[in-house]
Amino acid sequence: MNRKVLVIGSVLAAALVIILFAGLGKDPQAIDSPLIGRPAPPFALRAVGSGETINLEQFKGRPVVLNFWATWCVPCFEEHPILVANARALQPNVQFLGVVFQDNEERIQKFLDDRGRAYPTVVDDAGKTAIAYGVGGVPETFFLDASGTIVAKYAGPLTDAQLQTNLEKAMKR
Amino acid sequence: MIAALLFLLAVTTAAPKGQPLSGAALDAKTTEVASLLRCPVCQGMSIADSPSEMAVNMKHQVNAMLAQGYTRDQILDYFEKSYGQFVLLKPKFRGVNTLVWILPILAIAIGFAIVIKRLLPAARGEGGRRPDEGVEVMEENPPSPPISAAAGSFAGSGRSILIAIPAALLAFGAWYLVQPKQTPEPPPQAAEPIVAVDPVHRLEETVRQFPDNLPARVDLAKLYFDRNNLMGVFEQTQYVLERTPDDPRALTYQAFVRIGMGQRDNAAKLLTRATAIDPSLTDAWVGIAWIKTREGLPAEAQAAIAEAVRRHPEDASRLQRVYADMQQRKN
């Protein structure tokens, strides 16, 4: 009886340890989104500065890095230079696009003037696009392959390595 | 216009399955559906209860879809497709979630089984000594054949119990799960807040019920700041400043967000304005002292603290400690 309990207990404990250990290896910022593997929700939003309408469809045929951010978001300050540097190096083969929500255009302009711009930024006025993408907080970045399918999502400020790793997934397809 | 159209395409390709709602019915249904969706930027609150901008946007979305005739299930599906099951306050009985429903029942059943199995040998051992069963106590002699039979019969019924209890529990669990679930009632408008203990929840509830209660919003901003929720501070102070641009406390907490964002100049302007409007505002003087410390101007930092002390001598020792702490953190 005791031996049986010991064996069953050990098996359960081992299973628990394996599950926890597997979890430890994961990047907590790499969020499993139900949108991964599905077509990116379409949108057409007003561009900051020019005021022209930018449609996600127009970037089909090349990978897209879609970054949700806001000027009041402190981590967005950290990742902005990384996004700008990568956009300068990789465009036009890869398209970068910023989507700002819960913000105002004047502040966005000031932010971009102060910190540099290398790709279009659009304004999601009522947060509808953010909802369609399941955005919970900023920054969140989606990686789309050339066919417009979401292949990865990253919540939190991106480092150069994380951006490259996720971008590779988008380029592979 | 194009954006709205594209958005509708993104919402769902399925046609609405219900009747378009309007007026009071639309409002009631919006609250009902919103109370089933989790606010992604709050802690365990539904979008019906949360005053955050994200939750308000989501609630507008629910309202718009109901007005177009989408049903509750279609709307929940839409949000689930974007946010995953996390957004549903009541997880569905499928996939890994099944474990959440089944495991507690199973654990109770196993617990019962273990308890009974442990009790059984004891019950079997005492079976021959219970006078109320008409069995004589024969200490030296082994139990007679009728007694052994009785014990065996008890053991048999024990084994049946071992199977019956877990089975009954599982059956109850299954029955419970297949019961049609009642739609939760919308939260009563005038009811006391459910979570009245936590001041943040209490203020969030106040702000939800009375969006233009600006002092409550400023208090909430202060609490959010204490909990390092800069986004919350920003939202609340922004709301207040759009209506009363000279609210000194809102200016102060907005300045704190700016400090967090590295916009020291903006923050300094806001704090100077706040102290000009209300020179007794200790937090604003502390904010100025912090900025001056970071700028390497200790004399000006000390002057700001001295001004706060002059206004609030009862707070002198605390303010001096704050100043000393600032100087340490600078390094």
Image (spheres, coloured by chain):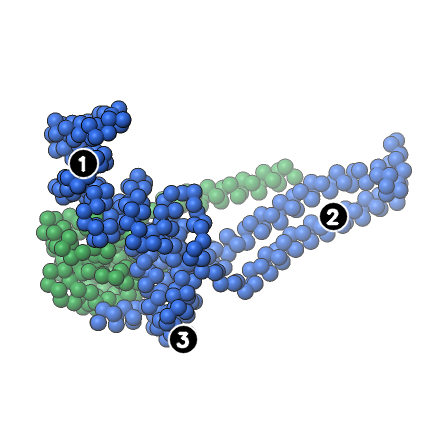
Pick whichever, B150 or B42, lies toward us: B42
**Mark identifier at residue B19:** 3
What amino acid is found at the position of numbered circle 2 in the picture?
A: Gly
- Callout 1 and callout 3 share a chain: yes
* Drawing shade for chain A: green
Subunit of mark 3? Answer: B
The chain in blue: B
**Mark identifier at residue A49:** none
* B191 with respect to B171 (left or right): left
Q: CA distance from mark 2 to mark 3?
A: 57 Å
Q: Residues within 10 Å of mark 1 (few under 14, many from 20)?
A: some
Q: Which residue carries the number 2 mark?
A: B158
**Foreground tag (2 vs 1):** 1
Name the residue: 24% across, 55% down: A102
Q: CA distance from mark 1 to mark 3?
A: 58 Å
Q: Which residue carries the number 1 mark?
A: B279
Q: Quadrant of residue B187?
A: bottom left
